[in-house]
Image (cartoon, rainbow, N blue to C red):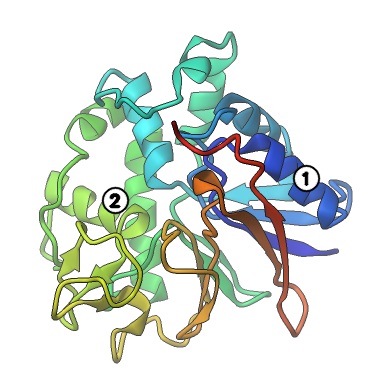
């Protein structure tokens, strides 16, 4: 059995199909890990959701910020943006079913046998694995519960920007959401900077990539993440970066993680995913 982790798809269905063909994926014997942002901005988000939701036990995905945005828009709690390409999902006869499936996906996936943990964006330096798992369960329970609309209504925002176990209510849930799905840079004390999106060296002074913070409590944990197309693909401070910017005319990347040495696979974007 082969296990592959795949970077942000964002509706680039044709590229995903070519990547699965490139790695020789077999639904009967292989497993896929998707690091979130299945949808939006690309042309075929509906097809991506249909494909992955029907993979049953051979695939796992974590939620990304664009996935949460779809949930919010579908619930009438989020503002539709000019570059959104979500309408085919909202209008599809199986749209409600697909959105319900997405709402029940996790924020974090940990495989103790393989030794890898997957999130969409990152982990604050104060979080060890147990804390991260606990925070993920908190947010997952809300998203899967009857009051999820109320959370989605108040999900957006950059505050609070630093973790404290004393955080409560919507402030706690918003921080957890931003950490798992939006963070790139933070200070050594864990104060998140959610505005800087460029590659390393372009950020404001005093901020570091979340994975490069000295003494972060998850340092011994190999973490697979996406979200950061300007960062580049590779192993960085023990974390595996997978967003190779397919949406922006780059590539879609997979890495095989069940062998002693990582093996990388890429397919080039054909251009259809580039926004106009």
Residue 55 falls in which quadrant of the image? top right
Query: Front-most of 239 and 28?
Result: 239
Q: Regarding mark 1 in the picture, which secondary structure is present there?
A: helix
Label 2 neighbour load within 10 Å: few <14, some 14-19, many 20+: many
Q: Position of residue 121 (x, y in %)?
A: 39, 60
Q: Position of residue 122 (x, y in %)?
A: 38, 66
Q: Identify whether 94 is placed above or below 185.
A: above
Q: Identify whether 272 is placed above or below 113.
A: above
Q: Is residue 145 in sight in this rendering? A: no
Q: Identify whether 88 is placed above or below 119.
A: above
Please give the residue where the numbered disc 1 appears in the rendered image. 18
Image quarter where the C terminus lies is: top left
Query: Front-most of 230 and 254?
Result: 230
Q: Identify whether 119 is placed above or below 155.
A: below
Q: Regarding mark 2 in the picture, which secondary structure is present there?
A: helix
Label 1 neighbour load within 10 Å: few <14, some 14-19, many 20+: some
Residue 177: which numbered mark, if any? 2
Q: Which residue shows up at 34% across the image and 84% down it?
A: 212
Separation (CA) of disc 1 from disc 2: 32 Å
Mark closest to the chain's N terminus, 1 or 2: 1
Q: Position of residue 54 (x, y in %)?
A: 71, 32
Q: Position of residue 117 (x, y in %)?
A: 53, 69
Q: Which residue shows up at 57% across the image and 56% down it?
A: 7
Q: Which residue shows up at 17% across the image and 35% down it?
A: 154
Q: In this image, 156 relative to 234: left or right?
A: left
Q: Which residue shows up at 64% across the image and 59% down it?
A: 253
Image quarter where the N terminus lies is: bottom right
């Amino acid at each position: 059995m082969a296990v592959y982790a795949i970077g942000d798809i964002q509706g680039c269905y044709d590229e995903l199909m070519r990547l699965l063909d490139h790695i020789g994926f077999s639904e009967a014997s292989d497993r896929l890990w998707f690091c979130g942002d299945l949808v939006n901005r690309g042309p075929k988000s509906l097809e991506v959701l249909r494909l992955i939701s029907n993979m049953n036990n051979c695939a796992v995905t974590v939620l990304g910020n664009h996935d949460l945005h779809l949930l919010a828009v579908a619930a009438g709690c989020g503002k539709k943006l000019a570059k959104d390409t979500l309408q085919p999902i909202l209008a599809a006869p199986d749209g409600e079913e697909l959105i319900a499936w997405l709402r029940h996906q996790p924020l974090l996936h940990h495989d103790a046998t393989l030794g890898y943990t997957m999130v969409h964006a990152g982990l604050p330096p104060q979080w060890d694995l147990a804390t991260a798992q606990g925070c993920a369960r908190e947010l997952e329970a809300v998203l899967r519960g009857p009051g999820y609309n109320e959370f989605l209504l108040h999900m957006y925002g950059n505050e609070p920007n630093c973790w404290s176990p004393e955080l409560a209510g919507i402030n706690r849930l918003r921080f957890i959401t931003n950490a798992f799905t939006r963070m790139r840079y933070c200070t050594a004390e864990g104060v998140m900077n959610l505005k800087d999106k460029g590659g390393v060296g372009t950020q404001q002074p005093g901020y570091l990539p979340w994975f490069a913070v000295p003494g972060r409590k998850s340092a011994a944990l190999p973490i697979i993440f996406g979200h950061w197309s300007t960062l580049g693909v590779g192993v960085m401070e023990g974390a595996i970066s997978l967003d190779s910017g397919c949406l922006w005319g780059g590539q879609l990347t997979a890495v095989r993680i069940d062998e002693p040495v990582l093996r990388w696979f890429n397919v080039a974007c054909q251009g259809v995913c580039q926004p106009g």
